[in-house]
Amino acid sequence: MKTREDKIFNAVGHAVMLVLSAAAVIPIILMVISSLTSNGALLRDGYSFFPKEWSVYAYKWVFASNGGMVLKAYGISFLITTAGTACSLLLTIGLAYGLAKKSLPGRNIFTFLVVFTMLFNGGLVPTYINYTNVFHIKDTIFALLVPSLLMNAFNVLLMKSYFVSSVPDEILEAAYIDGASEFQTMRKIAVPLSKPIIATIGMFAGIAYWNDWNNGYIYLVKRTDLYSIQNLLNRLMQNINALTQNASQVGNVNQGLSDIPSVSVRMAMATLGILPIVVIYPFIQKNFVKGITLGGVKG
């Protein structure tokens, strides 16, 4: 039976979580509503949950003026997110499984090297020089795939902790006795038992790849045809800002510029950017809490 203190603690916890959830969800709702509000109403009345004028002109403008580019950018984003998440999971699982083995020679040294990368890095300029002059990924599809996102030390340690705390050594030893190799044990025993943490790390990696715009901004100089959806929307937003600022400075707005929904189109672009993640997240949410909780146990 719950005590009075437990009930108070639960009530306060639920209240705090409701406030935090509202703080996360309400801006997204306002963003979507604003993208469906006429540009004139936004300029006149500001942002509102109950706009006076509804309109989908911002979406029509994006697809009418840049429809082919938007669809291609979506395709590149899906390709990079899928390939990047798969490669990231393969590398993370392999390294984390090795670090979870207490018999691994130099295990503490390797773990220290992984943690070290969380504290220090080479800096932007040396990183850029290495990737462009040594690996030659500039203006290639690998510029969106490799830098900064392919391996994450936090994800490695999270998965390592899960392997240590949630994959019984007795099961692994039974596999060894039956003649299974280390790779077979990992593939047929450890990985199937680690679906929650794999789904969690996969979501982390997928969101990082989908939301990334920095790699394209830095490494794609001439190949704008390789832009992901985030890069394309960022470029469109910069172009709109430049056009509106120049028009205001000159004091003369032609018909083409006046037709641009300069405010509502920003909300439409942001909505288009997060839409796939919002659609996919409910299907993997059930594994997220279990994976992040068990993976966070020190091991």
Image (cartoon, rainbow, N blue to C red):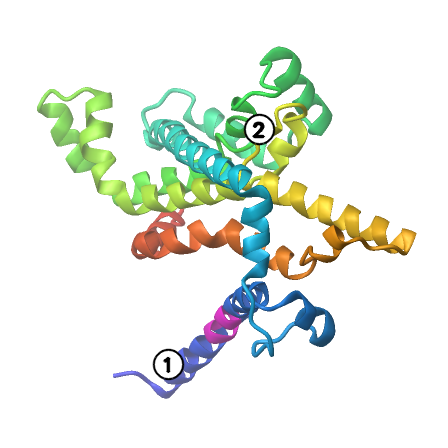
According to the picture, the residue beneath numbered tag 1 turns out to be: 6
Residue 205 falls within the magenta-colored stretch? no
Q: Is residue 56 above or below residue 233?
A: below
Between discs 2 and 1, the one toward the N terminus = 1
Residue at the right extreme?
A: 250
- Residue closest to the eye, 153 or 145: 145
Kind of residue at badge 1 = Asp
Q: Is residue 222 above or below residue 23?
A: above
- Residue closest to the eye, 240 or 188: 240
| Residue at the image point whose x is 39% and y is 42% from the top | 201
Quadrant in the rendering for residue 167:
top left
Residue at the top extreme?
A: 134
Q: Is residue 194 left or right of residue 13?
A: left
- Is residue 290 in view from this perspective? no
Cβ atoms under marks 2 and 1 closer than 8 Å: no
Magenta stretch, residue numbers = 17-22
Residue at the left extreme?
A: 178
Residue at the front extreme?
A: 255
| Residue at the image point whose x is 91% and y is 51% from the top | 250
According to the picture, the residue beneath numbered tag 2 turns out to be: 225
- Is residue 24 in view from this perspective? yes
Q: Position of residue 75 (x, y in %)?
A: 45, 36
| Residue at the image point whose x is 20% and y is 27% from the top | 185
Q: Position of residue 184 (x, y in %)?
A: 19, 24
Q: Is residue 186 above or below residue 281?
A: above
Quadrant (top left/top right/bottom left/bottom right) for the C terminus = top left
| Kind of element beneath mark 2 | helix
